[in-house]
Amino acid sequence: MYWELSSFLICLSFQVWNVGGKRSDGTCKKRPFTYTMADVKQCDKYWRCANGVLTPELCPDGLVYDYVSQSCHMPQRINCKGRMALQDPEPSELCPRRNGRFPVDNSCEQYISCEDGEGKIVTCPTNLIYDPKQGVCEFPDMANRTGCLAEELLGFTCPYGGGDDAVLPHGDHARIPKPNDCRGFYMCLKSGHPRLGGCQFGLVYNPLIQRCDNPEKVEGCEDYYKPKRD
């Protein structure tokens, strides 16, 4: 009895996965459950099939339909290839659409977070920028965003190219001291882009051993943490 019930549940789950989520071909088969299907042209539109009746529905403005999870998500997480059309936007004072994350003009580290038309400006943590392709805060060298490139923000270009086969002193990067900053250094990555690094509080970067060290062991940085006198 237990085996028969388990087999039935597995079979039912398989049916849900098979019929749900796929792109709608205009047919709605009668099933003992309700399921949804993606529209063939519009990424934020889907079709709900219940009791043999097919009904069109829209995601909240700014979100798109994911036929794998059969739910609406941010567009950065969903592949809309082949169904790029979207509903008309419903903008508000800050938000170009009612939901989503949008870059702030002339800013690398800020974005507008919109939820049901209510927008607020969010600032990324230090040394990170907003990546519109992923909808998250990211290192500039990873985001590779036009106008916000790591080289532009740091004012530094690595003196050599990278590459996956490059052999670097610290595995995935080499280190170059940051001028006039005992604590900081530039990490030259295999991508060829720089990333700002730094020693933990109390230590300074020692270029001789290419590691963080005690201030008294680094010439010119002995008094880095001592209070400055007027």
Image (cartoon, rainbow, N blue to C red):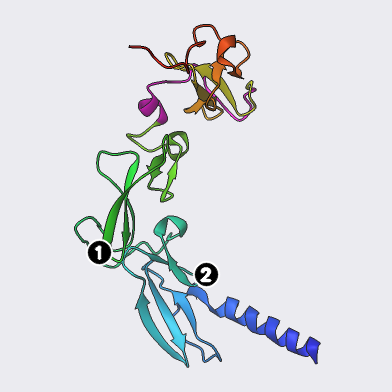
x and y percent of residue 103 in the render? 31, 47
Q: Tell which residue pokes out farthest to the left in this image.
A: 93
Q: Residues within 10 Å of mark 1 (few under 14, many from 20)?
A: few
Q: Would you identify the image quadrant in which residue 213 lies?
A: top right
Measuring 64% from the left and 84% from the top, which residue is drawn there? 12
Measuring 44% from the left and 17% from the top, which residue is drawn there? 181
Look at the image and give the residue range highlighted in magenta. Answer: 150-167
User: What is the CA distance from the residue labelled 2 to the residue labelled 1?
Assistant: 24 Å
Q: Is residue 193 visible to us here?
A: no
Q: Is residue 61 above or below residue 147?
A: below
Q: Nearer the viewer, residue 14 or 99?
A: 99
Q: Is residue 106 visible to us here?
A: yes
Which of the labelled discs sits on residue 69, or is there none?
2
Helix or strand or loop: what does disc 1 sit on?
Answer: loop
Quadrant location of the C terminus in the rendered image: top left
Q: Nearer the viewer, residue 51 or 214?
A: 214
Q: Nearer the viewer, residue 216 or 111?
A: 216
Q: Tell which residue pokes out farthest to the top in this image.
A: 219
x and y percent of residue 7 in the render? 74, 85
- Of the residues shown, which amino acid type is indicated by label 1? Pro
Measuring 47% from the left and 79% from the top, which residue is drawn there? 36
Q: Would you identify the image quadrant in which residue 87 lies?
A: bottom left
- Of the residues shown, which amino acid type is indicated by label 2? Ser
Measuring 52% from the left and 30% from the top, which residue is drawn there? 191
N-terminal label among 2 and 1: 2
Which of the labelled discs sits on residue 89, or is there none?
1
Q: Is residue 154 magenta?
A: yes
In the rendered view, does 61 fall on the left or right side of 78? left
Helix or strand or loop: what does disc 2 sit on?
Answer: loop
